[in-house]
Image (cartoon, rainbow, N blue to C red):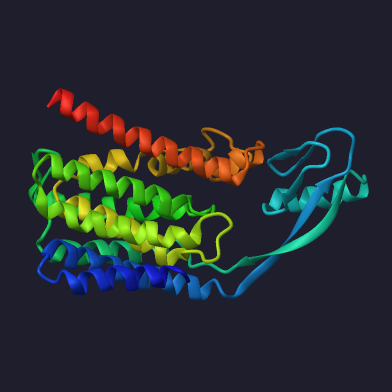
Amino acid sequence: MGGLAMLLGILLISCILLNNKNLILTALIMITAGIVGLFDDLIGLKIKEFQKVVRNIASSPTTIGRLTLDPGMEARVATDKAKIDLETLLEEKKIEVIGKVPIKKEVEEREKILAQIAVSVFLVITGAVSSKVLGFQLGFFVIPVVVFGIVGSINAVNLIDGMDGLASGILGIASIFCAVFAMINNNVTAVIPFIAIAGVSFGFLVFNRYPASIIMGDTGSFALGAGYITAGFLGNIIYFALVALAIPIISVIVSLLHRSHIIKLPVEPLHHTLHYRGLSEKKIVFLYWTLTLLICLAAVFAYQILW
């Protein structure tokens, strides 16, 4: 529920800078998306089930579900196949149950997407988004572009919000560089919304860094994802905003490939696979932050050299 603090932060900044149309509209989209995420968070207060946590006590690797556990390794029994394998492995005394974890109820994916599309339509009907995107005059085709952009950004940020400080740090870094890119191009109207998003992200990061005292939940991740891409559309720097968000976008692509059975991950999303492979949470977060920083720096330098 920490996302509510982020919404209050962007609302406060907007009240101070009432004359900035782009900021006000970005804040409205963030609040609208945040309310959608809040409903998901409230539903998540109910427990769907308790999943067992097991440890491999055999002297050799043991496979349960889609995971292969080395001796002493622990995992949560989540999939139907893993639950079936569990009974056999317990009888063979290859694993032991060491605990249970609560799994929250969630809104159906289809319902989430429909709600996110509604947020996108809200932005479209304001008429504030230019029909010229990435140098192309799209006309009415800007509508599906905006819908795809907001839905994609919300889900990208939501996907990486799985470790302390990961999402807020990446969005803070990306927003700062979007503001820098806008200043390089003398695009003053695009600067303020990104500075505001960066301020909210870094302010939240103070409490969300490892070990986190509060988490943003869907309220915060929906708001950040929608607000960030909205600022990109309104400031007409959507191309740079997408590049700066490369790490979350790549994570989404990898997850889609996994769900399509094109590739196989031991656990999803990608940052949890890295954790499963032995990287600590702090190292993974630092890695993602560093990669985002390097991509943004490279994009700025490349733009200055080529254009």
Q: Is residue 40 positioned above or below 200 on the image?
A: below
Q: How many marks?
A: 0
Residue 260 visible, this orientation: no
As rendered, which of 77 and 234 lies closer to the eye?
234
Residue at image point 75% right, 62% down: 100
Residue at the farthest top position: 305
As rendered, which of 2 and 222 lies closer to the eye?
2
Residue 108 visible, this orientation: yes
Q: Is residue 244 positioned above or below 194 on the image?
A: above
Residue at image point 28% right, 48% down: 176
Work out which quarter of the rendered image holds the C terminus and state it: top left
Q: Residue 283: x, y in percent?
A: 57, 40
Q: Residue 285: x, y in percent?
A: 51, 44
Q: Is residue 47 positioned above or below 285 on the image?
A: below
As rendered, which of 285 and 225 lies closer to the eye?
285
Examine the image and state in which quarter residue 121 appears: bottom left
**Position of residue 173 in the picture relative to residue 300 (left or right):** right
